[in-house]
Image: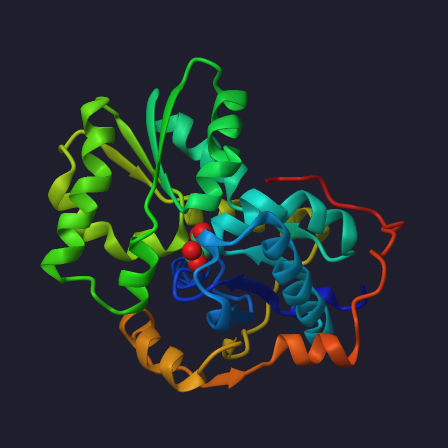
């Protein structure tokens, strides 16, 4: 790639969850330009099959590559758990996922680890396997929390119902006497205050977003792709309603973004994704 330093990093999620990764990127890598894609037309991802998820991620990566990104960060645990390995073998752009950075972060904090995540992430056992690979002595309990994403996307953060739902999901993990809780869906960081009010004080929350951004920085340094000039404004695109995303994301961004609507399915129908590309070019080491 020519002058890769100044090219943007692409990040994507089903919706508002990836903003937690975006904020970590702003904080830790303030010089990077970013393109954020939210697949809001097909949200939530957590109830989708692996086949559907892999196809969605393929479409997003195809669009991202057309935008000229230097790297893609999956700001979505569900995609990372289900599609990362396949997608990496199909695209030449380096792609980072949340699972391994999150697992490495979790084992630094404790030995009795609870995972809260979408149903698809729990079904994949990706976190459980990654944690036990890094630390075979760690004990892991998983809890699928399918109600959280719809509640967060409906902006019902402070609704008493949300707290009741959270208590139901967290209590079985508290009963296991966990010392660490992995927020295994990027949306969940938006409920950090609710979790704090329910969890015993000694339980440490781990947000994999912080760790994937550290891995992104290492990768950029390794490739010599870290940007040194001022970044461009973040570009936002969604597959659903741009106005709705602009309005809802204000709460988490602190500003109202300009959001473009992208019809991925139409784009792909106009230029179908061909057989997976062979990646003969040098692949960077896998951080996640
Ligand atoms: N925020 C995503 C994740 O980290 C997807 C949630 C969803 O759409 O169900 O898994």
Whether residue 87 is visible to the viewer of this picture, yes or no, is yes
Taking the image as shown, residue 225 lies to the left or right of residue 261, namely right
State the quadrant of the N terminus. Answer: bottom right
Residue name at image x 44 percent, y 83 percent: 242
Give residue 23's position: percent from left, percent from top. Answer: 39, 62
| Residue 30 against residue 48 in the figure, above or below | below
Work out which quarter of the rendered image holds the C terminus and state it: top right
Residue 110 in view in this figure: no
The residue sitting at 66% across, 69% down in the picture is: 64
Visual colour scheme:
rainbow
| Number of numbered labels in the structure image | 0
Give the camera-side residue of 22 and 6: 22
Q: Is residue 124 left or right of residue 27?
A: right
Where does residue 252 sit, x and y in percent of width and height? 30, 68
Please name the residue shown 62% across and 69% down the image.
8
Extreme-top residue of the structure: 137
Give 263 or 225, whichever is nearer the viewer. Answer: 263
x, y percent for residue 58? 68, 60
Ligand 1 quarter of the rendering: bottom left
Kindly indicate the quadrant of the structure image that contains residue 183.
Answer: top left
* Up-down relation of residue 132 to residue 14 (above or below): above
Q: Is residue 44 above or below residue 141?
A: below
- Closest to the observer: 231 or 184? 184
Position of 79 with respect to 64 (left or right) is: left
Residue 33 or residue 103, whichever sits in front: 103
Vertical position of residue 4 compared to residue 112: above or below: below
Residue 230, given in percent of the width and then of the height, sits at 54, 74
């Amino acid at each position: 790639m020519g002058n890769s330093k100044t090219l943007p990093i692409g990040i994507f999620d089903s919706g508002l969850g990836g903003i937690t990764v975006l904020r970590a990127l702003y904080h830790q890598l303030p010089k990077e330009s970013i393109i954020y894609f939210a697949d809001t037309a097909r949200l939530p991802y957590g109830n989708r099959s692996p086949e559907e998820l892999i196809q969605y991620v393929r479409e997003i990566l195809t669009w991202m590559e057309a935008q000229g990104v230097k790297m893609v960060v999956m700001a979505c645990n569900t995609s990372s758990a289900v599609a990362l390995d396949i997608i990496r073998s199909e695209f030449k752009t380096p792609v980072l996922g949340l699972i391994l950075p999150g697992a490495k972060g979790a084992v630094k904090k404790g030995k009795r680890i609870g995972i809260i995540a979408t149903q698809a992430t729990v079904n994949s056992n990706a976190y459980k396997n990654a944690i036990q690979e890094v630390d075979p002595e760690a004990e892991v309990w998983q809890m699928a929390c399918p109600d959280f994403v719809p509640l967060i996307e409906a902006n019902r953060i402070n609704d008493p119902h949300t707290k009741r739902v959270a208590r139901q999901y967290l209590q079985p993990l508290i009963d296991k006497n966990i010392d660490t809780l992995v927020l295994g869906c990027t949306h969940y960081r938006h409920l950090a205050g609710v979790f704090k009010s329910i969890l015993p004080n000694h339980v440490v929350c781990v947000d994999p977003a912080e760790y994937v951004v550290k891995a992104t920085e290492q990768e950029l340094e390794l490739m010599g792709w870290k940007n040194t000039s001022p970044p461009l404004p973040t570009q936002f695109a969604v597959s659903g309603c741009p106005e709705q995303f602009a309005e809802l994301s204000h709460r988490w961004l602190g500003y109202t973004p300009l959001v473009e609507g992208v019809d991925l399915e139409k784009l792909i129908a106009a230029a179908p994704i061909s057989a997976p590309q062979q990646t003969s070019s040098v692949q960077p080491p896998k951080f996640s």
